Image (tube, rainbow, N blue to C red):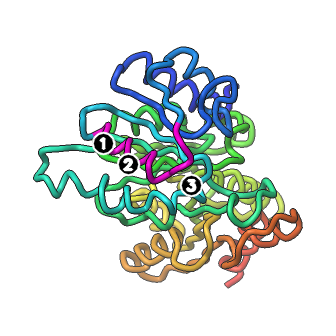
């Protein structure tokens, strides 16, 4: 079974083979190194004229990519660590996402910014964060996150084909994960329903009546499904999982559909708790539906430590999800 990393690498190879407008640029992406997490491995050997190694300047990388997109190319820019997207905020927020509107639809910016996010590797405060929430809600910018249940290759291919800029968030711990198949292995008792368009949402339902809806994305699905299995086996509590691939703009109809059945919502994310994705999902759900009970599971509002014991204490865990679920049901 292919891993998430292998599927992302395949998507880049396929895009460059089939579309000469696709360029890849970033720091240390040339072979034999092939990027910090090896997603670009093999590209520079096969397409030496269209894989561009850059200076250590994230703002320059995305600035150049924006210019390339304006001239009709389809650049894929890699930011080595997601923590460094703070350095591309101006290029994304004030330029790439705005040009379509500023120039009355006469230009488009078909650009993808890929970046690895997240902790659980002991990399410390400046290489372990999940900062995607800083870019949610920016008009004109899509934020997308692959997972191990949907096909990351298809998701990345869709982002490359998109005529608007996409921030593509890849959790580091997902790279080595094999893809999951609906109805097999740990998911044998779950039906998977796909809704939405280019960046689909997956809803996982068991044959039993669920008491909970758990909303998540990316690597958080790994924690969530483990927690759901524990809730079933140890507590006979069943939950539905709504797994998002597009974080912004929102399409929450699949979530509302699940909540009409359960009336209990848990949001799970690795970003810090305050003012995050889960808070906005919870607010939208509370505005739309009455008599909801809600819990949010996220990282503590602290810098992420190097020491594993402290990192584990700061980041959300399977037990945190289980505890939130038990708290809702007991209430």
* Closest to the observer, 157 or 306: 306
* Closest to the observer, 329 or 49: 49
Tell me the quarter of the image containing the C terminus: bottom right
Q: Is residue 255 visible?
A: yes
Q: Residue at x 31, y 31 (%)?
A: 73
Q: Earlier in the sequence, mark 3 or mark 2?
A: 2
- Tell me which corner region of the image, top left, top right, bottom left or bottom right, holds residue 293: bottom right
Is disc 2 placed on a helix, strand or loop?
Answer: helix
Residue 77 position in % (x across, y down): 47, 41
Q: Residue at x 47, y 70 (%)?
A: 281
Q: Is residue 170 visible?
A: no
Q: Earlier in the sequence, mark 3 or mark 1?
A: 1
Check disc 1: other Cα within 10 Å, few if <14, some if 14-19, many if 20+.
some
* Closest to the observer, 160 or 294: 160
Q: Which residue is mark 2?
A: 63
Q: Are marks 3 and 1 in contact (CB under 8 Å)?
A: no
Q: Residue at x 58, y 16 (%)?
A: 45
Is disc 1 placed on a helix, strand or loop?
Answer: helix
Examine the rendered structure and indicate whether residue 259 appears above or below residue 5: below
Examine the rendered structure and indicate whether residue 168 appears above or below residue 128: above
Residue 67: mark: 1
Q: Are marks 1 and 2 in contact (CB under 8 Å)?
A: yes
Residue 223 position in % (x across, y down): 72, 56
Majority SS type along the magenta span: helix
Q: Which residue is mark 3?
A: 217
Which residue range is magenta in the image? 54-69
Tell me the quarter of the image containing the N terminus: top right
Task: Determine if the magenta segment contains residue 55.
Answer: yes
Residue 81 position in % (x across, y down): 62, 51
Q: Is residue 257 left or right of residue 139?
A: right
């Amino acid at each position: 079974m292919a891993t998430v990393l292998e599927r992302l690498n395949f998507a880049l190879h396929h895009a460059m083979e089939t579309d000469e407008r696709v360029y890849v640029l970033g720091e240390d992406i040339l072979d034999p190194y092939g990027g910090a997490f090896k997603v670009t491995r093999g590209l520079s050997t096969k397409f030496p004229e269209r894989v561009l190694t850059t200076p250590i300047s994230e703002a320059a990388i995305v600035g150049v990519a924006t210019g390339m997109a304006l001239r009709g190319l389809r650049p894929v820019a890699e930011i080595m660590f997601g923590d460094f997207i703070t350095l591309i905020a101006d290029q994304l927020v004030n330029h790439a996402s705005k040009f379509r509107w500023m120039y009355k639809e006469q230009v488009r910016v078909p650009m993808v910014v890929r970046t690895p996010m997240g902790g659980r590797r002991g990399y410390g405060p400046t290489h372990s964060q999940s900062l995607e929430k800083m870019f949610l809600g920016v008009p004109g910018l899509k934020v997308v996150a692959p997972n191990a249940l949907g096909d990351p290759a298809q998701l990345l291919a869709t982002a490359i084909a998109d005529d608007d800029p996409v921030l593509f968030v890849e959790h580091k711990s997902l790279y080595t994960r094999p893809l999951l198949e609906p109805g097999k292995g740990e998911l044998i008792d779950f039906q998977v329903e796909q809704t939405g368009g280019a960046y689909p949402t997956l809803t996982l339902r068991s044959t039993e009546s669920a008491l909970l809806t758990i909303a998540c994305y990316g690597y958080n699905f790994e924690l969530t499904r483990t927690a759901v299995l524990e809730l079933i086996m140890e507590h006979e509590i069943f939950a539905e999982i709504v797994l998002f691939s597009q974080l912004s703009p929102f399409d929450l109809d699949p979530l509302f559909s699940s909540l009409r059945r359960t009336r209990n919502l848990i949001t799970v994310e690795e970003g810090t708790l305050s003012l995050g994705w889960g808070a906005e999902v919870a607010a939208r759900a509370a505005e739309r539906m009455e008599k909801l009970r809600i819990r949010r599971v996220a990282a503590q509002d602290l810098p992420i430590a190097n020491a594993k014991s402290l990192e584990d204490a700061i980041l959300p865990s399977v037990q945190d999800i289980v505890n939130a679920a038990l708290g809702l049901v007991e209430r």
